[in-house]
Amino acid sequence: MMNTVATAHKSELEQGALLDEIDRKIIRATQSGLPLVSRPYDDVASRVGISAGEVIARMHTMQQRGIIRRIAAVPNHYSLGYKSNGMTVWDVPDDRVNELGRQVGVLGFVSHCYHRPRYLPDWPYNLFAMVHAHNRDEAMLLVSRIADLLGDADRGHDVLFSQRILKKTGLRLST
């Protein structure tokens, strides 16, 4: 099963003034995902009462303003047979974290990769990369591929395997 999610920034939505009633209707109509139909924006438009072109334009504007962070497909990896999903965490030099993150992020088996702050002395890791595999042996091979790519920049790493599926949604508007 695949879902499409528009993720909104909570702090900006809490300000309220950034959204008019049409924007709120669009968010409410899409916060559980875009409809899985051949023309999803037409479906949203009919629910909101505007044209599909205006829905697309407003969503684009909200994305440019940072209200919607992204519109993307969100696969259910477990349903696709990927049972060993692990967040790999890496301690890499701070002055190279962006460069290395770009290299890791383009790997086909990494679904998302990002920079996070360290929390020394307990948490030395500053680069995170999610890998998806059918089993733990396969996952560890993927981790070794990342380690090979990072070379000497890998000053330590770990893998935090998922134990269950957590909620994958953005902010929800209640009214």
Image (cartoon, rainbow, N blue to C red):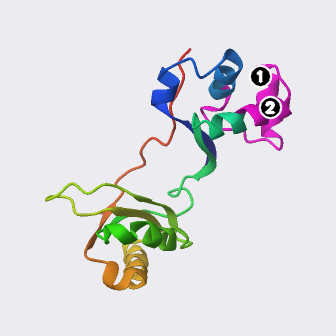
Most foreground residue, 136 or 114: 114
Q: Main secondary structure of the magenta part?
A: helix
Please give the name of the residue rendered at 33% of the width and 67% of the height, measured from the top-left corner: 94
Residue 41 is one of the magenta-drawn residues: yes
Q: Quadrant of the C terminus?
A: top right
Amino acid tagged 1? Arg
In this picture, residue 130 sits left or right of residue 18: left
Task: Please tell me whether mark 2 sits on a helix, a strand or a loop.
Answer: helix
As drawn, the label of residue 134 is: none
Residue at 44% across, 72% down: 100
Q: In the image, which disc is placed on residue 47?
A: 1
Q: Residue at x 83, y 40 (%)?
A: 39
Q: Is residue 61 magenta?
A: no
Q: Return the residue found at the far left.
A: 121
What are the residue bounds of the magenta stretch?
29-58
| Residue 140, x across and y down, in percent | 37, 77
Horizontal relation, residue 84 to residue 8: left or right: left
Q: Amino acid at mark 2?
A: Asp
In the rendered image, which residue does mark 2 sit on? Answer: 43
Which element type, helix, strand or loop, lies under badge 1? helix
Nearer to the camera, 95 or 143: 95
In the rendered structure, are the residues bearing label 2 and label 1 in contact, judged by CB atoms less than 8 Å apart?
yes
Farthest front residue in view: 95
Q: Does residue 54 sit above or below 161 in this rendering?
A: above
